[in-house]
Amino acid sequence: MPMSFDVPSSILTDRLELRAPRVEDAAAVNEAILETFDQLHRWLPWALHPPSLEETIEVCTRMAEKWSERKDFPLFGFERASGRFVLGAGLHRWDFAVPSFEIGYWCRKTAQGKGYVKEAVLAITKMGFEVVHANRIEIRCDAENNASAAVARACGFELEGALVNHRRNVHGNLNNTLIFAQVRNDV
């Protein structure tokens, strides 16, 4: 079901511009994925192999189409000062009956540890509650992904529990998934 509300195509934070994906972003995104592939491959199901530029162009094209059709809300994060691509994020897995959403994120290796993901998650969370009128926003991560869990905690998300043996990792082993959430009356 497409979104029936007006989502801003750009969100500005102190250091970032978070905006809708564009096909012309593909080279910068591909560079960041290749730089960070060893980490992405461990945690994210879409990172099965290092993508070619052509594959990243196709993904950016699909993301831009989903954005324009209001079927997903992916965001690319760029440093405002330099214009450098630093992260991917977004509001995903909607349940309009609640409404609830999940925030996903990843950060290129050379931009990690600088607070960019926290800055992006706080901005997306604010937009989710104020613009999208969410009653619940979740962050889910592999129980072994300490960096992702630290971001969730730093952004005020509470650990609600773990889904045991929830998914298989890249080695085929069963892993647990942590569920963090904020609900409207928390904010």
Image: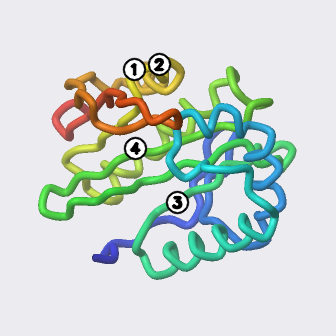
The residue drawn where x is 74% and y is 71% is: 57
Residue 79 location in percent, x, y? 76, 43
Mark 4 and mark 1: span between their CA atoms? 16 Å
Question: Which one is in front, 136 or 23?
Answer: 23
Amino acid type at mark 4: Lys
Mark 3 residue type: Pro
Which residue is drawn at the image coordinates 48% and 23% (left, top)? Answer: 145
The residue tagged 1 is: 153
Instruction: Give yes or no for contact between labels 1 and 2 (Cβ–Cβ under 8 Å).
Output: yes
Task: Identify the residue under disc 4.
Answer: 126
Point out the tag, 3 or 4, that comes first from the N-terminus: 3
Q: Amino acid at mark 2?
A: Ala
Label 2, on which residue? Answer: 150
Report the residue that reaches farthest toward the right: 82
Residue underneath mark 3? 74
Question: Between residues 157 and 28, which one lies in front from this camera angle?
Answer: 28
Identify the secondary structure beneath mark 2. Answer: helix
